[in-house]
Image (spheres, rainbow, N blue to C red):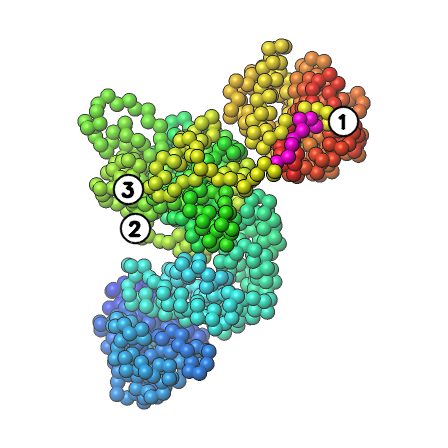
Amino acid sequence: MHSNPSCCPAVLYRFTAEVNSLTQSHVNLIAQSSRAFLESHPPAQPLTQLHSSAAAPRTTHETKELKHPRNYSVIYSHIYSSLAGNAFAEADKFGRWARLCDTGLVPVTGGSSFHRWLILSQTFPEADGEVIPVPEGNNVPYLSCTSSHWPETLRHRRSEICAGRGCAGEKIPAAFATVVSKAPVLQMLGRVLCTVLFVGALPSPAAASQGHISVVLLGATGDLAKKYLWQGLFQLYMDQVSSGHSFTFHGAALAALEPGQRLMFDVLKKLSCPPDEPPNRCAVLKDQFLKLSQYHQLKTAENYTALNREIETLVGQEGLKEAGRIFYFSVPPFAYTEIAQHISSSCRPPAGAWLRVVLEKPFGHDLESAQQLAAQLAGFFREEEMYRVDHYLGKQAVAHILPFRDQNRQFLDPIWNRHHGTRSPELHFASSPCPGRTSFYEQYGVIRDVLQNHLTEALMFLIMELPANVSSAQDVVQHKVQALQSLWGLERSSAVLGQYQAYSSHVQEELQEARGYVSTTPTFAGVLIHSDSPRWEGIPFLLTSGKALDERVGYARVLFKNRAYCTQSGTLRDAGHSQCKPKQIIFYFGHGALSTPAVLVSRNLFQPVMPKDSWKEAEARSDLHIFGQPLSDFYMYSPVKERDAYSVLISNIYHGRRDFFITTENLLASWAFWTPLLASTSRQPPRLYPGGVENQQLLDFEMVSGGLAFSLAEPAELLSPGGQMPSDFRAIQSKFRQSPLVSAWAEELISQLASDMEQAAVSSVARSGHFHLALSGGSSPVGLFQRLARHHYSFPWQHTHVWLVDERCVPLTHSESNFQGLHRHLLQHVRVPYFNIHPMPVHLNQRLCVEEDAGAQLYAKDIVALVANASFDLVLLGVGTDGHTASLFPRSESGLQGAASVVLTESPVKPHQRMSLSLPLINRARQVFVLVLGKGKHDITTLLSRVGHEPSKWPISGVSPSSGQLVWYMDYEALLG
């Protein structure tokens, strides 16, 4: 049973990963072996020095080789605490001291500094009564209850503490009074463990250390850190203490060392363990976590350099290698760039170690600001190093949407589509009023705060195509982006907005606005979304969120079409399986009547497959109803162990699960989808509602003509959008460049233009039997295309020929192709005969826009063959900020004059090569409509109002139909600025 002592340190070091997997049989074997071994092998030297903690010595047992508090103290404390009260306690017959408590930070008399003290109680009469010397490298002093050398700030509490009341006056649990030996404990324990392992009493030793992880929390004393992040980091430590990694936790903020340290440790002392965590293990791990945590002021470049030096020194002293570093940005986004620069230049880990930078929302205010922030961060970090947090992806019900769909494919495949199943997926989140968050909320509002991120991410999990491997982060992210890109663009009629009545007073009070200030920031929104994917085309998706509603609750709910017609009365049917009851699947995020995350499936659908290790079937309470149905109508499952969203996400950061985070591509696709709605509703006054149960039906809405509208008539009290008075308005002319002008806000302008186009089409078909329409590409007409697809069901598409005004020289399937945009937003949604669609032939002979291929001449021949007199019935044009129209550009004679009706041109921006109708051909049209939108076009609009016919400088100025009509459609922002 004797073993070579030289093996012990290595065995003990490897054993750290196994400590938390000890079974009771292991405990008993350790106790028996330890007692037998110590009785026959007493220590060979006097027991003189206290070792409360030390790092793994690599080659010797000598005390001077023992360094900082790390793995050994966890093993020793954990094993002793686990065996409190049983035979193993007898093994430590050389123990002299029991720990009473850790005081935390205590002020030093006469100064502004603080110390922590570990209070020890003498348990044997041999104690010398002196202050126990502190081992080298340990900054926590120890006090003996028999010593008279207590600091003045603690002396008056000595009797109370030493009487067993603890540092805070509470009665301490017996298991918390861990014995700390005045002997070389590690050497003694190492012998015990070596003996046990030698005789095969335990499983094989764990692998050697996997390396050290440094976690740096920036904003360590802020609200988010206090409420969630420190608790999440502590949970990570509890979960991974036996993983083979070692950890240090560095809290950082702008505050100086002493006040920042005081604030941070006030938070750490309040950390808690899950209810099912054994109290003794919780106490030991919390103590260890505090020892592994330290505060840093990070304000200057020198501070970051010092932090990096400290991490490198610590890892070097421990003889470890770095596995990686986590930097968690719990700071406002305006600070991201400066911090990113410091980390990139001073705090990157060495080669072979990873870097993970965690970013909190908001990630921009709209598409442009998101692109700017993304570009700035990309200058410092690689894409795989960035983890953008959306805490909804850590909510257990949201995180289980994809696994649920994957594990229940056999049931869902037939019904998870537009043909057989879903009627109206809806996602909803309601929260409390926002006093205290008004400064943030006034800048962002409900759409940016909840819909653009939280609910959109949950919606993507519902509607994305399932990858073959849902565990592949790359595949999941790719399918999410594809689902985002399949969504129809939003317009103002897609949303209804509201604001609770007390909100403006909150703004006045917290932001010190004038008493008469009126905010137009919405606190409630309902948004209707459609997808053009084959699976979901025609199915409406509803996203709603609001503050001060009647209940705080969040859920994603999928309703299924009910094809059954029931002849029996409801009382005679099987309540649980009646096909006439609603069929639905609900992912319940929390709060509300259930107060717990849950997955509910109607019993008349199927009994779902759920992982038994993480979800359990819950007992249906007869007194609870959800969406008007008793819980007994559902199979209901709740988590075996509830976990906070941030704990889940921090664990995923540790494991490198990037599918739980927002990639740059994902982020920009989301902002591209939401920004047009935000712009179109920026001047829309929200409906006021009182809040709570008094809302009654005031916020109920319905789907009308492809959009949303409140069900009840508008109340008399409305918000004024900025308090405009008649003097704020100016007269708007009815002519522009001697041609008719139609002007309105963008939404109304698009509606009017679509109606005028339909009228022109109807008139042309009545006159000649067909309608030849030439459409421009770009971003301006997208809203028009969507309007035509969604609202103009009487448009004579069967008799319409669709031509392109211009095209980029890219394949027609390319995202920058004008035809691709036209197809996506219009053509695939209307019934135009395929042979009536005429894309420009830019891609011939497997090459693009080569003159020898004669693509321009081929298009011109088609026009001559099909269009009478080569005169289009209607040409839709736009205007560039440089005055170009179609793909006819300033200072280029190509296409401005001559006999050619279709030409190849060069654009000053990529892609440079273009194909375009010529100016003479455009001027032969019966009608030409020019659409101009946005503030960005105000300068060119002003210039065009003053210049004459100069197409070489401004090609749009050359548009003047020889025998037709020119009409300008210009929104107020382009016209008035």
Identify the secondary structure beneath mark 3: strand
Residue 893 falls left or right of residue 341: right
* Residue that numbered label 1 is attached to: 958
Give the quarter of the figure containing the N terminus.
bottom left
Q: What residue lies at 38% left-to-right and 48% top-to-bottom?
A: 432
* Residue that numbered label 3 is attached to: 636
Q: Is residue 817 visible?
A: no
Instruction: Identify which residue, 209 or 148, lies in the foreground.
Output: 148
Q: Residues within 10 Å of mark 3 (few under 14, many from 20)?
A: many
Instruction: Identify which residue, 932 or 70, lies in the foreground.
Output: 932
Identify the secondary structure beneath mark 2: loop
| Distance from the alpha carbon under mark 1 to that under mark 2 | 72 Å
Q: What residue lies at 40% left-to-right and 80% top-to-bottom?
A: 141
Q: Which label is found at residue 683? A: none
Q: What residue lies at 60% left-to-right and 66% top-to-bottom?
A: 301
Q: Which label is found at residue 640? A: 2
Q: Position of residue 397 (x, y in %)?
A: 36, 45
N-terminal of the two: label 1 or label 3?
Answer: 3
Q: Position of residue 258 (x, y in %)?
A: 48, 73
Q: What residue lies at 22% left-to-right and 27% top-to-bottom?
A: 570
Quadrant in the picture for residue 633: top left
Q: Please say whether residue 731 is one of the residues in the magenta stretch.
A: yes
Q: Amino acid at mark 3?
A: Met
- The stretch of residues the image draws in magenta is 729-736
Q: Amino acid at mark 1?
A: Gly
Dominant SS of magenta comes to: loop
